[in-house]
Amino acid sequence: MHYFSGSHLNGLVEHEAIAGTPHLVPAGVDLTTSKAVPMKAGGCIFHHSQCLHHSHPNRSDKWRRAYVCHFVNQDADFTLISGFKAVIPILE
């Protein structure tokens, strides 16, 4: 996993779609300025929702799995990406 130091302090940034995938990438970001954060297989990492991050393509014959949780205020606005279903439990 690679991170862009201090990027969580910049607020929301414009993203562009990668054709044929559900992925969005920040516009105009130089990947060579990111810093590697090594993770062991099965490891876990937490980061701020506005922290820009990326990983290199998986070149192995095994799946790369991720489990993502987003925690927001109950009155938060969100936008669904076309073709994806959001499961939003309300905790009170």
Image (cartoon, rainbow, N blue to C red):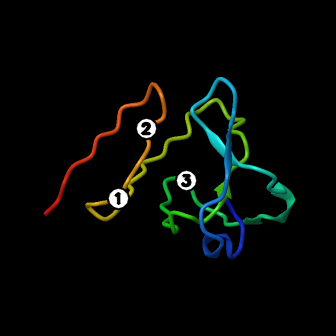
| Residue at 64 percent of width and 29 percent of height | 61
**Residue 58 x, y percent position in the rendering:** 68, 38
User: Which of these two is toward me, 28 or 60?
Assistant: 28
Q: Earlier in the sequence, mark 3 or mark 1?
A: 3
Residue sitting at 56 percent across and 40 percent down? Answer: 64
- Under circle 2, the secondary element is loop
Give the quadrant of the C terminus.
Answer: bottom left
Q: Whole-Å distance between the Cαs marked 3 and 1?
A: 33 Å
Disc 1 secondary structure class: loop
Which circle marks residue 80 in the picture? Answer: 2
**Disc 2 from disc 3: Cα separation:** 31 Å
In the rendered image, which residue does mark 3 sit on?
Answer: 41
**Res 1 seen here:** no
Task: Using the image as rendered, state which of residue 2 and residue 43 is in the foreground.
Answer: 2
Q: Which image quadrant is residue 80 in?
A: top left
Q: Of the residues under marks 2 and 3, which one precedes in the sequence?
A: 3
The residue that disc 1 covers is 76
Inspect the image, locate mark 1, and give the three-letter code of the amino acid beneath it. Ala
